[in-house]
């Protein structure tokens, strides 16, 4: 190692001028910066000519090698190799430290290569599957990164620390304490992972959670964001969604609408049903299969209540209300053309026979009654004046 450190001392003698030393240093720094900036393009270029795994190894080796060479050139040009060697001697690094450092460094490089390989593997395996969304692929990649780096960190710590078991036990106790302090947050995060993989809904779906209804705009590990039909953004914690009843109106790609309409009791109900079905069938948003269906639902206070049911595809709030509005208008126009009455609520009043039922007073009786009422009120006022404390 000492010979390796002093091997570049000749650069300081070959370049005695400070100006040339500065120029060489700037060139070395420029090479490192250009390599870092062009690393992705170089990696893509190598990927086109060989396997991605080989491209990772070649590009990473080239990057590390160029950085070390430039660092050694700059140190040798300025004649600082002796100081590096002296520092190495003062640190008293034994023969086991350097192999450990090299092993740790190589393990980190291999970890970077493995994470990239796993990312490409996930994209190739799940990219062609329509059952796995891009969001789920991203989450899977992040989980794989956490697992791979955790294993690599444990291995590196095992190389440098002899009593790794006690450290892991302490970390376990610390994890338990943190988990108890933030159990709600951890529960929310676990619910977020469950929602991402269970897929009860996706971004763009129209869902209803308890009293909140809207379109899903984002699903994170902590919460789910909805955009209501009033333009408001609603943030719902994932643990609330996991413990609540969720209605997904977009899951099947179609939605059934139901409209109630009443017809007069004197109307031919079969004829009214046929007219309503024909009217809904002419709506642009209504699907032909399943076909629209109209059934009798109940006897209302003033009408026979019919239920018109039909389906729309690609359900959204706009399509829902547009189809509903057109269906109501079409049924009303069809009934008006056939003189079918849609009655408004009516109430019939009847008097008891033993009390003589209802009697309509004529104009003379009403005038007499009003005069009597006025006289009675005058007498009451006079009586009130007679009993006031002032007159007593």
Image: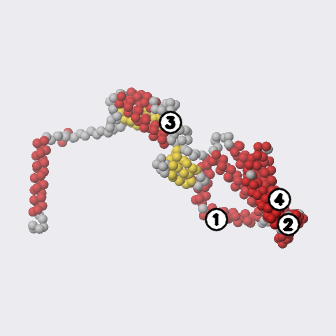
Are the residues tagged 4 and 2 within 8 Å (C-beta)?
no
Local SS, label 4: helix
Are the residues tagged 1 and 3 within 8 Å (C-beta)?
no
Q: Quadrant of the N terminus?
A: bottom right
Disc 1 target residue: 177
Disc 4 target residue: 69
Q: Quadrant of the C terminus?
A: bottom left
Task: State the CA–CA distance, disc 3 to disc 4.
Answer: 67 Å
The residue located at (55%, 48%) in the rendering is 217
Report which quarter residue 306 is drawn in: top left
Q: Nearer the viewer, residue 89 or 313?
A: 89
Q: Is residue 68 above or below residue 213?
A: below
Local SS, label 1: helix
Task: State the CA–CA distance, disc 4 to disc 1.
Answer: 47 Å
Q: Nearer the viewer, residue 302 or 238?
A: 238
- Give the image location of residue 376, x and y in percent: 11, 53
The residue located at (71%, 48%) in the rendering is 119
Disc 3 target residue: 312
The residue located at (50%, 47%) in the rendering is 214
Task: State the CA–CA distance, disc 4 to disc 2.
Answer: 20 Å
Task: State the CA–CA distance, disc 1 to disc 2.
Answer: 61 Å
Q: Is residue 150 visible?
A: yes
Between disc 3 and disc 4, the foreground one is 4
- Give the image location of residue 244, x and y in percent: 53, 50
Task: State the CA–CA distance, disc 1 to disc 3.
Answer: 52 Å
Are the residues tagged 3 and 2 within 8 Å (C-beta)?
no
Are the residues tagged 3 and 4 within 8 Å (C-beta)?
no
Between disc 4 and disc 2, the foreground one is 2
């Amino acid at each position: 190692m000492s010979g390796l450190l002093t091997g570049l001392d000749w650069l300081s003698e070959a370049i005695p001028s400070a100006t040339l030393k500065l120029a060489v240093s700037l060139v070395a720094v420029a090479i490192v910066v250009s390599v870092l900036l062009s690393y992705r393009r170089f990696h893509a270029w190598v990927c086109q000519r060989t396997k991605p795994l080989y491209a990772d190894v070649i590009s990473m080796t080239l990057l590390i090698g160029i950085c070390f060479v430039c660092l050694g050139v700059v140190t040798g040009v300025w004649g600082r190799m002796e100081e590096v060697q002296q520092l190495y001697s003062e640190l008293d690094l034994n023969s086991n430290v350097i192999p450990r450092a090299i092993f740790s460094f190589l393990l980190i490089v291999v970890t970077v290569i493995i994470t990239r390989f796993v990312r490409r593997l996930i994209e190739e395996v799940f990219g062609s599957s329509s059952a796995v969304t891009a969001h789920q692929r991203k989450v899977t990649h992040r989980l794989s990164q956490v697992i791979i780096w955790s294993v690599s960190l444990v291995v590196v710590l095992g190389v440098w620390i002899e009593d790794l078991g006690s450290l892991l036990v302490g970390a376990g106790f610390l994890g338990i304490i943190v988990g108890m302090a933030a159990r709600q947050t951890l529960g929310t995060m676990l619910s977020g992972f469950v929602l991402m993989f269970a897929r009860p809904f996706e971004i763009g779906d129209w869902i209803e959670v308890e009293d909140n209804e809207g379109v899903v705009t984002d699903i994170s590990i902590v919460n789910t964001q909805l955009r209501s039909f009033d333009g408001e953004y609603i943030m719902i914690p994932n643990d609330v969604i996991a413990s609540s009843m969720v209605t997904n109106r977009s899951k099947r790609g179609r939605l059934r609408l139901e409209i109630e309409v009443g017809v007069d009791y004197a109307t031919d109900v079969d004829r009214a049903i046929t007219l309503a079905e024909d009217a809904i069938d002419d709506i642009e948003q209504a699907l032909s299969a399943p076909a629209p269906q109209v059934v009798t639902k109940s006897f209302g206070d003033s009408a026979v209540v019919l239920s018109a049911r039909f389906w729309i595809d690609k359900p959204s709030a706009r399509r829902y209300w547009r189809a509903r509005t057109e269906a109501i208008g079409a049924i009303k126009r069809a009934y008006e053309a056939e003189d079918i009455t849609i009655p408004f609520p009516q109430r019939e009043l009847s008097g008891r026979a033993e009390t003589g039922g209802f009697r309509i007073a004529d104009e003379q009786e009403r005038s007499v009654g009003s005069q009597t009422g006025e006289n009675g009120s005058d007498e009451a006022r006079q009586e009130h004046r007679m009993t006031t404390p002032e007159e007593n």
